[in-house]
């Protein structure tokens, strides 16, 4: 068979796209389908091993019974066909001479080796580093199934993929122990998994070239942090510090100290000088997650730093210049908060230089099967499952019908829960996804109670409900905070707690005194 028998540039590019979208197993399944009718291939797998073939890691396999990831248990090198030629392309037309080694057959940890179960093999090294080599194996149940022409055609077909793998994986080295299978993926990898995020990925590639402030908007669990990671990883600051801060998790009284740092003795408990997050991120990037949870008074101080490029530690006499790129994210409707006076308009304009909207999972349902397979591979490896369970069509249809209010994060947890239950049921052959759903305000169905469902924008957050209630109580009490019929007595909270809540809501400022007048906006 000549090289032109099945090689095509389109197929070569497709292999690369499939890897970027779904990982190695997606590529192998695509290759298996592409080669069907062209070559008698029944199985394809990829392995990563040291150059002595003592440690072998199965990376991906079209078979559900894959090579176990075990090192040689004795001084004997783990059996591998023609291990002395591990860095060279080879064809073995008849594997039977390798299938009668008593030591191999008697060792349970070696009985899953593919060469014991197939008749012929074609092996290609895709790339190598100083210690290890990455191999792809094509298996057939026919003798003499492969020719040198097939080998050359497959080499050409896999060349773009091999280069991508070399870039992504060549830093994996083996030093006398089996390395873990790479299960963590980069921010850009996560975006590449989802065809529905193509537009987001394109924007990320553009904004990463600048130092402009970026605001990422999207529902909880939709992938905002992955977008921030991707921007950092593809920017000129990728080798500099990347500090992540959840603004909603910092108590109001500690915001200044955490963000800007403090000097020794500046307040009770300040036993030493501490650099804030801005100083830690100097030269790099600061990711301010859930920026919408920041109080109005903290927003003022943040805006000053963004405008001046300088921070002043609590208790310090001078300001410190910092060179920090800001990436902010929120699940809140910030424009609405601006209109309602709960987020500063000038800070909104300062942050939203380059806004990126991440669509929720329900608006990109084609991503669901790809993400399910990715999470299954990742979680199955962590759980030590010997193979990936079958996903019945009706199970996948149920996932596609569901609204996913928790987005990708909820899908990931659903897959993990299903695999844990599968691992505990010895007789199970397929996986069942149990969706634990809360009442969904996005549902278009009306419950049996006959209640009227609200639109999404009519459902306030718990914090918004709390703030509305405090405002109503304050107005009812005419601004009276303590004593009989006061706000603290009605709310049944301590006076200092109420003042802290009011400060967070922008109704109180220690520098200016109370700004509450007894009247609140609805």
Image: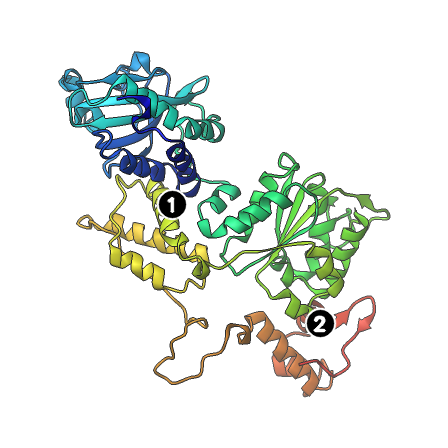
Where is the N terminus found, in terms of image quarters? top left
Residue 326, x across and y down, in percent: 68, 49
Q: Which residue is drawn at 78% across and 49% down?
A: 313
Name the quadrant containing residue 355: bottom right
Tell me if 364 is positioned left or right of 292 in this view.
Answer: left
Residue tagged by mark 2?
341
- The mark closer to the camera, 2 or 1, is 1
Residue 50, x across and y down, in percent: 38, 20
Name the quadrant containing residue 51: top left
**Lower sequence index among marks 2 and 1:** 2
Where is the C terminus found, in terms of image quarters? bottom right
Dots 2, 1 in contact, CB < 8 A:
no
Residue in front for this viewpoint, 133 or 74: 133
Tell me if 338 is positioned left or right of 35 in this view.
Answer: right
Residue 504 is labelled as none
Tell me if 489 is positioned left or right of 37 in this view.
Answer: right
Q: Residue at x 33, y 23 (%)?
A: 153
Residue 158, x across and y down, in percent: 38, 28
Q: Real-space Cα distance between discs 2 and 1?
A: 42 Å
Q: Is mark 1 on a helix, strand or loop?
A: helix
Note whether residue 42 is visible: yes
Q: Which residue is drawn at 66% across and 47% down?
A: 286
Q: Is mark 2 on a helix, strand or loop?
A: loop
Note whether residue 269 is visible: no
Residue in front for this viewpoint, 498 or 280: 280
Q: In this view, does 360 lie above or below 204?
A: below
Residue tagged by mark 1?
374
């Amino acid at each position: 068979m000549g090289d032109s028998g099945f090689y095509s540039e389109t197929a070569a590019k497709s292999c690369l796209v499939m890897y970027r979208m779904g990982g190695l197993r997606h590529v192998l399944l695509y290759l298996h389908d592409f080669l069907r009718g062209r070559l008698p291939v029944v199985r394809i797998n990829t392995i990563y091993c040291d150059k002595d073939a003592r440690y072998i890691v199965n990376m991906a396999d079209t078979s559900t019974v894959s090579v176990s990831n075990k090192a040689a248990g004795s001084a004997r090198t783990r059996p591998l066909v023609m291990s002395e030629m591990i860095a060279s392309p080879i064809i073995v037309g008849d594997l039977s001479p390798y299938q009668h080694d008593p030591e191999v057959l008697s060792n349970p940890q070696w009985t899953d080796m593919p060469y014991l179960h197939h008749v012929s093999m074609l092996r290609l090294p895709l790339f190598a580093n100083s210690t290890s080599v990455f191999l792809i194996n094509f298996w057939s149940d026919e003798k003499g199934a492969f020719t040198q022409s097939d080998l050359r055609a497959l080499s050409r077909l896999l060349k773009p993929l091999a280069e991508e793998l070399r870039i992504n994986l060549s830093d994996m080295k083996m030093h006398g122990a089996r390395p873990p299978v790479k299960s963590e993926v980069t921010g850009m990898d996560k975006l590449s998994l989802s065809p529905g995020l193509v537009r987001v990925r394109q924007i990320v590639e553009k904004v990463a070239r600048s130092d402009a402030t970026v605001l990422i908007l999207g529902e909880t669990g939709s992938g905002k942090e992955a977008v921030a990671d991707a921007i950092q990883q593809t920017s000129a600051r990728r080798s500099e510090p990347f500090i992540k801060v959840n603004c909603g998790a910092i108590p109001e009284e500690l915001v200044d100290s955490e963000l800007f740092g403090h000097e020794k003795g500046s307040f009770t408990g300040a036993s030493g000088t501490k650099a804030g997050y801005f100083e830690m991120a100097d030269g790099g990037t600061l990711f301010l997650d859930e920026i919408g949870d920041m109080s109005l008074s903290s927003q003022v101080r943040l805006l000053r730093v963004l405008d001046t490029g300088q921070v002043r530690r609590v208790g310090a006499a001078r300001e410190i210049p910092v060179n920090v790129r800001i990436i902010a994210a929120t699940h809140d409707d910030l424009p609405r908060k601006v209109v309602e006076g709960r987020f500063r308009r000038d800070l909104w304009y300062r942050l939203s230089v380059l806004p990126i909207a991440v669509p929720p999972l329900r608006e990109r349902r084609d991503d669901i099967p790809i993400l399910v397979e990715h999470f299954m591979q990742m979680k199955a490896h962590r759980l030590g499952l010997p193979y990936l369970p079958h996903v019945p069509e009706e199970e996948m249809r149920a996932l596609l019908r569901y609204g996913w209010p928790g987005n990708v994060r909820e899908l990931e947890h659903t897959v993990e829960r299903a695999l844990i239950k599968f691992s505990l049921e010895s007789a199970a052959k397929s996986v069942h996804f149990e969706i634990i759903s809360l009442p969904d305000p996005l549902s278009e169905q009306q419950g049996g109670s006959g209640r009227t469902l609200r639109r999404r924008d009519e459902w306030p957050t718990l914090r918004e409900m709390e703030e509305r209630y405090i405002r109503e109580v304050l107005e009812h009490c005419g601004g009276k905070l303590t004593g009989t019929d006061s706000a603290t007595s009605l709310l049944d909270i301590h006076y200092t707690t109420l003042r802290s809540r009011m400060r967070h809501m922008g109704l109180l400022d220690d520098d200016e005194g109370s700004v509450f007048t007894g009247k609140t906006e609805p």
